[in-house]
Image (cartoon, grey):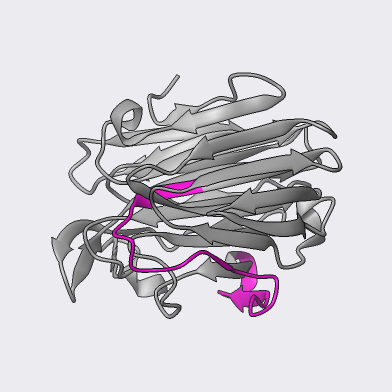
Amino acid sequence: MSHLLRKPTSATGLVHDITPENAGWGYVGFQLHRLVAGAVASGLTGGQEAILVMVEGRAQVQAAGQDWGLMGERMDVFEKTPPHCLYIPPAQGWQVVAETDCTVALCLAPGKGNHPARRLGPDGITLTQRGEGSNTRWINNIAMEDADVADSLLVTEVFTPAGNWSSYPSHRHDEDDFPRITYLEESYYHRLNPAQGFGIQRVYTEDGSLDETMSVKNHDVVLVPRGHHPCAAPHGYEMYYLNVMAGPLRKWRFVADPDHEWLM
């Protein structure tokens, strides 16, 4: 199995705990908690900032010394409604108490303490089409660079219809050379509908020093340390992924694979 493909470690509880140390990079962290009703998840942000995403279900949320009340509305991520999210600054505690079965993601990256805790969505998040034809997908931008809400984190949701491609045409963001390109590590948390399905993701460099093609299943995470990273949803299976990006500069600038740039 590819070292870039991370499988859930359990069915419930903390099922993913990706850190810069175990990913072998410097910026992105990602936790996924699958909680049954009544279960509790909690933690400290330490030197990191966090964006908590209610992927599915409802929960009582406390963070940064505040009670944020009941968060979450969609019970199935493929409803495609805007997610309830919360930005949590560094050096703060957080706690989630599940009111229903729920899936909670914690997107993490180095923080500087420049932003206060605040809700991010559902208000202000609009499902937007990107691409056309078999490259059509739908985007919920949670915290991209046009929103000055975080020090490092860039977070978005993507819904790819069955039979379509996504993160395509192939592109990379693995050099620190702004404004031409920025260095951003990236993680993909995948979901499939129906849940027994699979998707395909390739991570590769133009010189072939990295070239991994992975079959991704429900709740898998793919790490993208460098290179191009397109994915595809087979006929009959809709794909969702939650992207987390971070690097030295909170800007998303990419370069297309020269072989496929004509598609841009």
The answer to if 257 sits in the magenta stretch is no
Q: Position of residue 139 (x, y in %)?
A: 61, 68
Range of the magenta residues? Answer: 107-134
Rendered position, 105 above or below 183: above
Q: Position of residue 166 (x, y in %)?
A: 54, 58
Left or right of 31, for residue 96: right
Q: Can residue 85 be spotted in the picture?
A: yes
Assign the magenta stretch its main secondary structure: loop
Residue at 28 percent across and 48 percent down: it is 227
Q: Can residue 219 be spotted in the picture?
A: no
Residue at 45 percent across and 19 percent down: it is 1
- Extreme-left residue of the structure: 177
Q: Quadrant of residue 257?
A: bottom left
Most foreground residue, 235 or 6: 6
Residue at 57 percent across and 49 percent down: it is 232
Rendered position, 166 above or below 237: below
Q: Position of residue 193 (x, y in %)?
A: 78, 45
Rendered position, 161 above or below 48: below
Rendered position, 92 above or below 169: above
Q: Quadrant of residue 74?
A: bottom right
Most foreground residue, 140 or 39: 39
Left or right of 138, for residue 38: right
Most foreground residue, 172 or 36: 36
Residue at 65 percent across and 50 percent down: it is 62
